[in-house]
Amino acid sequence: MSKQAETELCFYARIGDVDGFDQAIDTEHHEQWEHKVKLGEDYRGKTRIRRTEREGHVKFEETIKLPVESEAVTQGSHEYTVSITEEYFSAWKKLFGDKGYKKTRYVFLSKEVMLDHQEESIKLPDIKYEVDVFFDKEGQRAKWCKIDIEIDDILAYLAEHHPEIEKFDTTVWLSKLPFKPEDAFSAVTDDEEQKEAIKAFWERFAHHV
């Protein structure tokens, strides 16, 4: 079993140039199903199964995701993942599969990441962008995508090498990604229109057993 603490920034954006996905450093195809767990109105977390195909190889995994308190616009969770069989995947899907999603994940890297702090420029670890492009039940690709920006390596680096930096401001230039995302907004938002757009997006691309 693998255990991982995950802290990320999450955005939604319109896909400006589909051909830009050809520049991704890695590509995976996912089929995943999830089951959310509540105790009354209290959200406890969720469990998820995923079929991942990468370069002709297929693997099956189950993940438990427990939410943790996050700062500002970040989203955090503790993830516990185990390998499963295709037979277990099919049985879980039939029994627990509330909603499923089919998507392609494209990975991009930003290598020149700097942090200016008290007249010092600090070279930070690379930033990884995981861009999920969803497909509906008819196989139509979404015009919008979800962009996750993993920052755990940066937080760990600063904690080890610059413990004096407890908080810092960030500017994310999503428009510089090769697929030219447009109209991006954070998944953590107080804007009611954006909240409704996120809800409609997930409902539009949900699959059901």
Image (tube, rainbow, N blue to C red):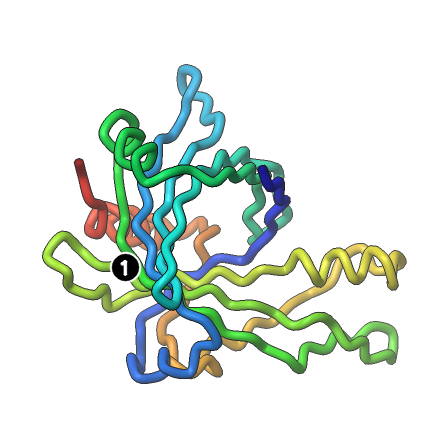
| Quadrant location, the C terminus | top left
Q: Is residue 41 above or below residue 206?
A: above
Query: Among all residues in the image, which is located at the extreme top?
Result: 40
Q: Is residue 17 left or right of residue 185?
A: left
Relative image position of residue 65 (x, y in whole percent): 50, 36
Q: Quadrant of residue 11?
A: bottom left
Residue occupying image coordinates x 30% and y 35%: 87
* Residue at 27% over, 59% down: 134
Number of labels in the image equals: 1
Q: Quadrant of residue 93?
A: top left
Q: Secondary structure at mark 1?
A: strand
Q: Residues within 10 Å of mark 1 (few under 14, many from 20)?
A: many
User: Which residue is identified by label 1?
Assistant: 134
Which residue is pictured at 41% across the width and 20% down the height? 41
Q: Quadrant of residue 97?
A: top left
Q: Is residue 58 visible?
A: yes
**Residue 209 appears left or right of 83:** left
Name the quadrant of the N terminus. top right
Above or below, 135 relative to 44: below
User: Of the residues shown, which amino acid type is indicated by label 1?
Assistant: Phe
